[in-house]
Amino acid sequence: MKYAIVLPDGAADEPLAQLGGRTPLEAARIPHMDWVAEQGRLGRFVTIPEGFTPATDVGTLSVLGYDPHACYSGRAPIEAAAKGLSVRADQLIFRCNFVTVLDGLMKDNTAGHIAQAEADALIADLRRELADEGCEFHAGVTYRNLMLLSDAAELTLRCAPPHDIIDQPVAAHAPQGTGAGRIARIAERARAVIAAHDVNRRRREQGRAPVTDIWLWGQGRPARLEAFASRFGLRAAVITGVDILRGMARLMGMEIIEVPGATGYIDTDYTGKGRAAVRALDEFDLVVVHVEAADESAHLGDAGEKVRALERMDEAIVGPLLERLAGSAAWRVLVAVDHPTLTTTRGHSAIPPLFAFAGTGIEAVERAPFTEPAAERGGYWVTPGHRLMDIFLRG
């Protein structure tokens, strides 16, 4: 049996006025995702358990068959695993976003999707200037970076994800808990380093909005996950452009297939990902393809771009995978959304998203397109959501 899983990050949404009262999935031309839903099972599942913040980390753990209650320790530790960072017992790992705060409001959680060279230069200077605070900065993918904080074993903090507070006052979402004052001091010192940096001088000369702050969140300590092969008996590979999926793959013992041009943004190389996925099925039992573009489009508040991202994914990834799988003696494919990202609020939602799977041994039941209303009408629920993987593989 060959298996393929496609993860359109944040694809689920609400009906939008600019799309004539349709969701992006309803507005998009996605014949291949629709085929999966029409020829197999279509439903909804609870990917974000009660008490968890809706995000790719928790949602994708659920999709891949891991109970967040049992194994989740924070987003940053998973991304640290992607980089193979060595973390001491006294260190706490933070996700460190570059952001733009203007007039006290979170205006951009990506600092205008800061260029890699800009991010690398800022990280290098922050590493030097804040070493006396016990800070160890590590460059990631553009705005997505990491900070390890020493002497932090006793810290218990609540930190807001920056993508969930766009256009909101940052003061209302400052870190809370033991150690919050220390985090505030680090952020204040970082703000001064960034303000005087050549990166911002050049951005001002180019008429671009500045990078103003770091935003620390997603904190935790090193994560441990049972190997996917031990759990499900399959040799698997992951294709992604972001470290959160790379980290999960590394922790789960999956192969990571790097695709040049896989950016984790709307300009990602869809065709390159699709071709790599098709090739991977020659070697692996299961291939997972994660695409961030729909999520990023919703964070931009751009419904049209979200529709286009879904259509590109359908044409360049889902279509070729279905064609390749059709030549296998036995196969199954799953399209699963980790969480909704709402274009109106530009933030994540814990509303249970949708999934569809089809293939060998799967009976067509709902016979409806891959849309939120169709999934709700069908009434097929999987809760808790981490049970879906076992149903898909063995049901």
Image (tube, rainbow, N blue to C red):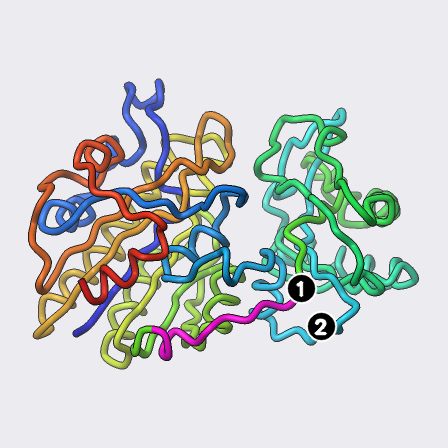
- Picture coordinates of residue 181, whole percent (x, y): 86, 44
Which residue position holds label 2? 87
* Extreme-right residue of the structure: 132
Q: Which mark is residue 300?
A: none
Please tell me how crowded label 2 is: few (under 14), some (14-19), or many (20+) other residues with Cα within 10 Å: some
Q: Nearer the viewer, mark 1 or mark 2?
A: 1
Looking at the magenta stretch, what is its main secondary structure?
Answer: loop
Q: Secondary structure at mark 2?
A: loop
As rendered, which of 280 and 112 lies closer to the eye?
Answer: 280
As rendered, which of 70 and 8 lies closer to the eye?
Answer: 70
Q: Is the residue under label 2 in contact with that under label 1 (CB below 8 Å)?
A: yes
- Picture coordinates of residue 274, whole percent (x, y): 29, 62
In which quadrant of the rendered image does the C terminus lie?
bottom left
In-image side of 210 versus 294 (left or right): right
- Picture coordinates of residue 134, whole percent (x, y): 86, 63
Q: Residue at 70% across / 27% down in the picture?
A: 105
Q: Residue at 63% across / 36% down in the picture?
A: 108
State the image quarter where residue 352 is shown.
Answer: top left
Span shown in magenta: 221-231
Residue type at mark 2 is Val
Which residue position holds label 1? 221
- Picture coordinates of residue 261, whole percent (x, y): 44, 61
